[in-house]
Image (tube, helix red, strand yellow):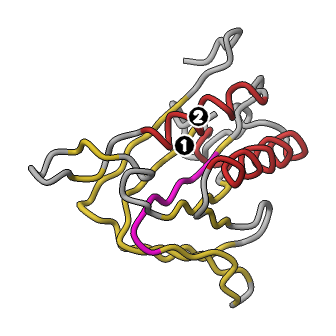
Amino acid sequence: MIGLIQRVARASVRVEGQTVGAIGTGLLVFVCAERGDSDAQAEQLLARILAFRVFADQAGKMNLSVRDVAGGLLLVPQFTLAADTRSGTRPSFTPAAPPDEGRRLFDHFVKLATQAYSSVATGKFGAMMEVDLVNDGPVTFWLRVEAPDSRRN
C-alpha cells in the first residue's frame, strides 16, 4: 500500500460541490492499494503514518507525529499513485488493486484509522474529488508498505 502524506495547515475534499471531509493542521494522506496488498499492509501503513515524525518540535526539528500535535488526518483514495510511468506517455494502472479490492482495503484502512485516532476525515472512493490544501513547508513524503510476495520494482 502507498501513502503520499502532506503536512498541511488545512485541507478539504469536495464531491459534487459538497465538502465531504476537512481538517485543520495535520496530514493529508492520499492512499492507494496495490495488487497483492492485504489487511496487513493497511495496518502497517497506518501505524507508520500515525507515528511518522513530520511536525516540528520546539527546536524546529521534525520530531513530532500527527498524534503528538493532535492534528487531523484526511484520508483520500487515489489509485493513480500505483501507476507505472516507466515508459510511454500514458500511465498503466495495472499495478493498482482492482477497484473492488481497492475499495475494500481503503474502507478497512479508514475503519482502522477511526478506531486508532480521534480526528479522521475522508474523501469518497470512486468519486471525482476536488482537494484543496495548504501544504505546510512544503512537506511531502511517499510511504510504501509492500506485500511480502511482491515482485514490484
- In primary-sequence order, the first of circles 1 and 2 is 1
Decide: is 108 above or below 25. above
Q: Residue furthest right?
A: 100
**Badge 1 density bin: few <14, some 14–19, many ≥20, Cα 10 Å:** many
Residue at x 30% of width, y 53% of height: 139
**Badge 2 density bin: few <14, some 14–19, many ≥20, Cα 10 Å:** many
Name the foreground residue: 134 vs 116.
Answer: 116
Q: Position of residue 78 (x, y in %)?
A: 65, 53
Q: Position of residue 48 (x, y in %)?
A: 50, 34
Q: Residue furthest left?
A: 59
Amino acid at the residue labelled 2:
Leu
Pointers 1 and 2 in contact (CB under 8 A)? yes
Taking 63 as reference, is 74 left or right? right
Quarter in which the N terminus is drawn: top right
**Helix, strand or loop at disc 1?**
strand
Q: Position of residue 50 (x, y in %)?
A: 50, 43
Q: Which residue is mark 2?
A: 45
Residue 50 on the magenta segment: no
Q: Main secondary structure of the magenta part?
A: strand
- The span shown in magenta is 24-31
| Residue 3: assigned label | 1
Residue 148 figure quarter:
top right
Residue 104 figure quarter:
top right
**Helix, strand or loop at disc 2?**
helix
Decide: is 109 above or below 119. above
Residue at x 29% of width, y 65% of height: 136
Name the foreground residue: 97 vs 37.
Answer: 37
Quarter in which the C terminus is drawn: top right
Residue 25 on the magenta segment: yes
| Residue 62: assigned label | none
Residue at x 38% of width, y 46% of height: 65
